[in-house]
Image (cartoon, grey):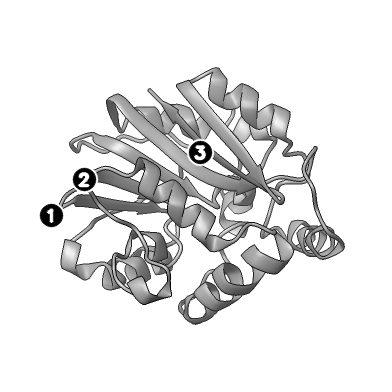
Amino acid sequence: MSVISDDSVKAGQAIYTPRTFQLYDLIVLGISNKFIWQCPTQRLVDLYNSNITGNHLDVGVGTGYFLEREARHQGGRCQFPSSTPRIALMDLNTNALEFAARRLVRYQPGRYCQNVLEPITLNVKKFDSVGINYLLHCLPGSIESKAIAFDYLQTMMNPNAVIFGSTLLQGNVSRNWLAKLLMGVYNTKGIFSNQDDDLEGLVRSLNNRFRDVSIQVVGCVALFSGRL
């Protein structure tokens, strides 16, 4: 399979600058999830808490919000099954890696700058859980072609490890007019590349690679998990 151009991959993450991350939690997790994508952020927190292990790799790290244990008065965040979890962060955007690593500094997370649409050749211990949250809809290509990221991430997973995450879909999901408008703008600018992403394609991509696959659709967000 040919590798998607670096320019198209970089376009999906170029907007994420240090300044952007100062507002990300408020705009994306506080406003967009609830009112536009119609999937409250707590549903994503619950997905993490249902699947995360003490040996975890997070891919497409955002601000590191979902890996933070504090702020229980705000609804709570990630609850690791270990008091000393092994955490690693993987992203093509070095700004994201630095921001999330600072937020999670008490865990001393590993940091890997990696394009998930290319083979992963890191020589590190494998992981028992892999989170890939809000990344697929930023990757270029169809859902079937970008799902090659699952193949590459499998090389980082131990037997019986779980992969879980979420992505914004367009086909065969409910979208309000704001979601349609914003997705159109983001796709035009190259921030998103999900104009051809539909639920059926995601189901096929996961079932072809994993067992015990679970997919829930909330608004226009698909929350998924599967085991190696």
Location of mark 3 (residue) = 117
Secondary element at tag 2: loop
Q: What residue type is labelled 3?
A: Leu
Q: Judge depth for marks 1 and 3 and give the one in front.
A: 1
Mark 3 neighbour density, 10 Å: few (under 14) some (14–19) many (20 or more): many
Mark 1 neighbour density, 10 Å: few (under 14) some (14–19) many (20 or more): few
Specify which label sits upstream in the sequence, 1 or 3.
1
**What residue sits 84% from the left and 63% below the top?**
181
Q: Look at the image and tell me whether residue 103 can be seen.
A: yes
Percent x, y of residue 146 = 59, 35
Q: Is residue 73 left or right of residue 2?
A: left
Look at the numbered discs 2 and 3 and tell me whether their residues touch, using CB distance below 8 Å: no
Q: Which amino acid does label 2 sit on?
A: Gly
Specify which label sits upstream in the sequence, 2 or 1.
2
Question: Marks 2 and 1, how far apart in space?
Answer: 7 Å
The answer to whether residue 162 is above or below residue 45 is above
State the residue lying farthest toward the left. Answer: 84
Location of mark 1 (residue) = 84
**What residue sits 80% from the left and 37% below the top?**
172
Location of mark 2 (residue) = 54
Q: Judge depth for marks 2 and 3 and give the one in front.
A: 2
Secondary element at tag 1: loop
Q: What residue type is labelled 1?
A: Thr
Look at the numbered discs 2 and 1 and tell me whether their residues touch, using CB distance below 8 Å: yes
Q: Quadrant of residue 45?
A: bottom left
The answer to whether residue 227 is above or below residue 167 is above
**What residue sits 41% from the left and 54% below the top?**
91
In the rendered image, the quadrant that contains the N terminus is top right
Q: Out of 49 and 156, give the one closest to the viewer.
A: 49
Percent x, y of residue 154 = 38, 28
